[in-house]
Each structure stands twice: as structure tokens, then as C-alpha cells.
Amino acid sequence: MLTHEYTRRIEWADCDPAKIVFYPNYFAWFDDANWKLFAKGGFPPDVLYNEYKFAGMPILEAKSKFIAPSKFFEEITIASHVADWREKTFDVVHKVFNKGTLCVEGMETRIWCEWHPDDPSRLKARPVPKAIVDALSA
């Protein structure tokens, strides 16, 4: 399976008064990691919108397990991959490492959406295109 890793520095504003990452920030970073994963597979947003009638991949479920803290000015690495594909939904797993230690495990269940053919102001769940499944499963 295709995995994307990226490193980010934790900034002062990412932390709470205890000087550790304020937990909602991980969910924002997971979203960013998801987009980076799709881009690595050859599907940046402009390709998705222009070639696949893509309208979004909303989150149906998101969860995290916090194992160890990370603090400001430390660098973390977020590794992400799609762990499970279903017809219209998929699970993206994120693992956050700090100095090689697993700190956070996260998972998002997302749904593939296109614009509704009868009402372009609405979304409609559609099967994930095979080219995308194949590329991110390689």
C-alpha cells in the first residue's frame, strides 16, 4: 500500500498550557496528511476536481489514541495510508512518531462524493474510482 510520511515542527500555538500538543490539532494534521497522501498517489485536488467529478471526501468517523505527548519545537512525522477500501468509503490510518516513538494513532473513515446530478448544491456518495484505489493500494 502507498504510504506518505511528512515531518512538521510543533509550534508554540499548537500547544496547550501544559506545553503539549492540543489534541484537536492532530485531527487537522490528519486531514492535511490525507490530502498529501492522495497527492503522492497522483491525485492532487486539481486532478480530483477536473478529472473525477470529485466534490469531497467528508469524514464519517474519526478517532485517535494518544500514547505519548509531543511538545513545542519538537518535530513529528506523520505516516498515513489507506488501510481499507469499500465501495464508497475508505479508512485512512495515521501514525504520529516523535523521535521514532509512536505517539498517536488515528483513523478516519471517509466517503467519496461527487456533486448530485439532480441538485448541484448537494453531494452524492459514489464508488471510489478504480484508478485511485489501485494507485493508493500499490
Image (cartoon, rainbow, N blue to C red):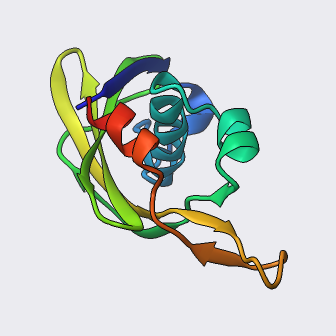
Please name the residue shown 54% across and 38% down the image.
Answer: 35
* Viewer can see residue 18: no
Name the one closer to the observer, 11 or 25: 25
- Viewport quadrant of the N terminus: top left
Name the one closer to the observer, 60 or 62: 60
Snapshot quadrant of residue 5? top left
Snapshot quadrant of residue 107? bottom left
Q: How many marks?
A: 0
Q: Residue furthest bottom?
A: 118
Please name the residue shown 45% across and 27% down the image.
Answer: 41
Taking the image as shown, residue 2 lies to the left or right of residue 28, namely left
Please name the residue shown 44% across and 36% down the image.
Answer: 19
Taking the image as shown, residue 121 lies to the left or right of residue 2, namely right
Q: Position of residue 113 (x, y in %)?
A: 59, 66
Name the one closer to the observer, 21 or 6: 6
* Viewer can see residue 88: yes
- 123 over 133 or under it: above or below: below
Please name the residue shown 38% across and 65% down the image.
Answer: 89
Q: Position of residue 52 (x, y in %)?
A: 64, 49
Taking the image as shown, residue 62 lies to the left or right of residue 44, namely left
Q: Position of residue 57 (x, y in %)?
A: 56, 59
- Viewport quadrant of the C terminus: top left
- 84 over 61 or under it: above or below: above
Q: Position of residue 6 (x, y in %)?
A: 42, 19
